[in-house]
Image (cartoon, coloured by chain):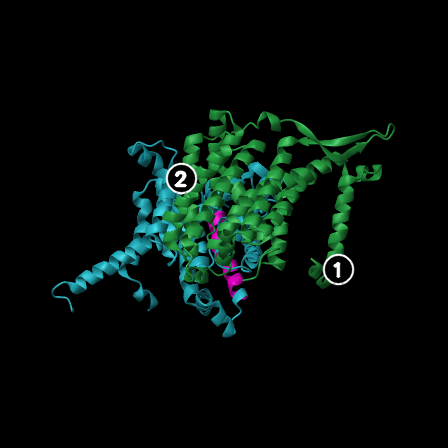
Amino acid sequence: MWFERIPVVWWIVGLALLLLPLVANNFWLFQVMGWSFILGMIGLSLMFLAGYGGMVSLLQMSIAGMAGYMVAILGQSGTATVSLGLAWWIVLPTALLIAALFATIAGALSVRTEGIYTIMITLAIAAAFFYFTRQNYTIFNGYSGFNLVLPPKLFGVNWRDPIPFYYLSLGCATLSYGAVVYIARSPFGLALQGVRDNPRRMAALGFNVTAHRVAAHALASVFASVGGILLVWQNAQIAPGTIGISAAIDVLVVAVVGGMRRPLGPFIGALIYVVLQVFSPDILGFFGFAADRFKLIIGLGFLAVVLFSPDGVLGIWDHWRAREARRKAEAPGGWA
Amino acid sequence: MDDFIRRHPFWSLVAILAVAALLWLVLAPWPPELVALWGRKQIFLNALLGGITLGALYFLVAAGFTLIFGLMRVVNLAHGSLFLIGGYLGYEIATASGSWLLAFPIVFVIVAVIGLLMQRFIFSKMEGEELRQTLVSIGLSIVFADLMLWWWGGQSYSILAPQFLQGPMELPIINNVNATTGAVTWLRYPAVRVWILVAAIITGLAMWLVLNRTQLGMLIRAGVDDREMLAASGVRIQLVFLAVFGFGAGLAGVAGIIGGTFQSLSPGEDTRFLLASLVVVIVGGMGSIAGAALGALIIGVTEQMGFVYAPTYSVVFTFLIMAAVLAFRPQGLLGTGR
């Protein structure tokens, strides 16, 4: 059976995550873990594009924000003049669809260029979207955005309560993770990795390079959108600040710090980021700094990772495991 | 020029007509029908001139960015931070010494040294790894932004222009003709902005001269075209890189003083000007100085015109221009295809 091939460690991690509500308090479940899963999902969509498609896009936060905004605009919010108040089963698919459309158009623009140009162009598009939401009042309600955006009370559960929200975000994150692992091994995923490694050869083999890249943008948008919708529900509000430039860069930081080679990386990066952010006053106070120097820590940590371990925390882990394996092999009694 | 006209007769005609229409709009007194349609001429002229001066400022920031990119393939996303550092330092020096002009050389040198250190100790260590260099520059920009927030706080600073640049000056452009008396009023415009424009044009011309008429410029142009070949022919290319990086950084710093004089300095201005330079070089063509000038002019004027005539959508115009350029000419208006 396929599940027999899953390593034991995964079963333990899975069980621990499932049983976490027994030991953790609401703050950990809702703020720390919930936010980590959400940020991890948005980071995952970047990891999918960057790791498998070779396209480092700073747009993923904007796409998440677009989905979140659509939920607020089509569904119910505190701003009744703009929100349409449609039923959730119309709102959610439409939000995902509009976000995917946005990602496809933006992706189609950005894949006209390659490599570092992609970063510049996606950053410019993300900024344009941010300024647009801030200036436009008829659709995006400008500066103030939307508040009181609540998840539907399906099955009589208030999904914003810490434990349901924890399981909801855990479920979505697991599904996204599984989907990325599956897609990476599917013919499409393999072709995408081929396009990443050698676009000219793939084109010569008859693959449509541009179509694969645009499709990757569209697919990645789903993970980001789910994360964005959960983010709106978690905060119960969305405003231009949610999708600002620094938020877009935070997603990049999360993915790079965790490691962009494997889908697990963004989740680890997100957990590190969230823990640092939530506990930064304590950590900084311990070292005698003012409590608001959180960004400095993040920036320096990011710099350290990029300078010394380009594959992120997972890269350090791989490196350490390889060294252990070498040491075992060299030790007396080993097969060497 | 002749060649262009011969190859694209239609577009040349369109361009000539557009320039003629613009000249007429600027120079002639507006008939009442046009005023009824578009508002007063002064509003239009102010938006146009404001756009051109803004474009001049964008050019100063973007020129260094595009030069560094063209030669070293480094997308220095910390360029906006260099702009803001220059502005803050300029403010400190101008207030401490009381001399606005003195701030320019000092800031140029300090920010150029920061750029040199970045190139020498960080970017040159990872040559060829473009993505990593970009990521490092993002990290640097986060750190710089927080250090500046720490030191200078969240309030906004404005650098006071010196006495001889304050107040308006009259430009030889007709603002309005009084219908009854026939008296002509000329357009009055802040002197400091006019001089910023002049300074940007002089800087641009000087850069063009250095690039096209000196030996250093020859090395830089050769490096832009083929870096490996230049290094292989015995040129100490790292020195050329340092010179260009230092100059580009210093220019961004000086632009910071100018930005602080005619607008203001606050946290967030670094990203704003980084984005402006990104859009300018995407539109104009990456690595091209003339492209930066053209892009800066287009973006500056669009932004101001949009701000005056359609404030809700001014950002969208800028973005639409960028999207159109990407869709039809991905290498930028004056960029060379690679």
Looking at the figure, which quarter contains the C terminus of chain B? bottom right
Instruction: Report the residue at 54% width, 43% height from top.
Output: B61
**Residue B38 as seen in the image, left or right of residue B282:** right
Q: Point out which mark residue B10 bears.
A: 1
Question: Would you name the residue on which mark 2 appears?
Answer: A295
Residue B299 position in % (x across, y down): 62, 46
In the image, is residue A54 above or below residue B266? below
Residue B182 position in % (x across, y down): 86, 30
Helix, strand or loop for the magenta stretch, by majority: helix
Of the residues shown, which amino acid type is indicated by label 1? Answer: Phe
Badge 2 element: helix
In the image, the chain rendered in green is B
Could you say which is closer to the camera, residue A103 or residue B304? B304
Report the residue that reaches farthest toward the bottom. A205
Q: Is residue B201 magenta?
A: no
Q: Is residue A214 magenta?
A: yes
Which-is-in-front pick, marks 1 and 2?
Answer: 1
Instruction: Report the residue at 35% width, 41% height from top.
Output: A276
Could you say which is closer to the camera, residue A208 or residue B244? B244
State the count of labels: 2
Residue A221 in sight here: no
Residue A285 in sight here: yes
Q: Could you tell me how far apart the alpha carbons at marks 1 and 2 are, in whole angstroms? A: 54 Å
In the image, is residue B320 above or below residue B230? above
Start and end of the magenta stretch?
A211-232
In the image, the chain rendered in cyan is A
Residue B311 position in % (x across, y down): 66, 39
**Residue B178 as seen in the image, left or right of residue A102:** right
Q: Label 1 crowding class (10 Å Cα cut-off): few <14, some 14-19, many 20+?
A: few
Of the residues shown, which amino acid type is indicated by label 2? Answer: Lys
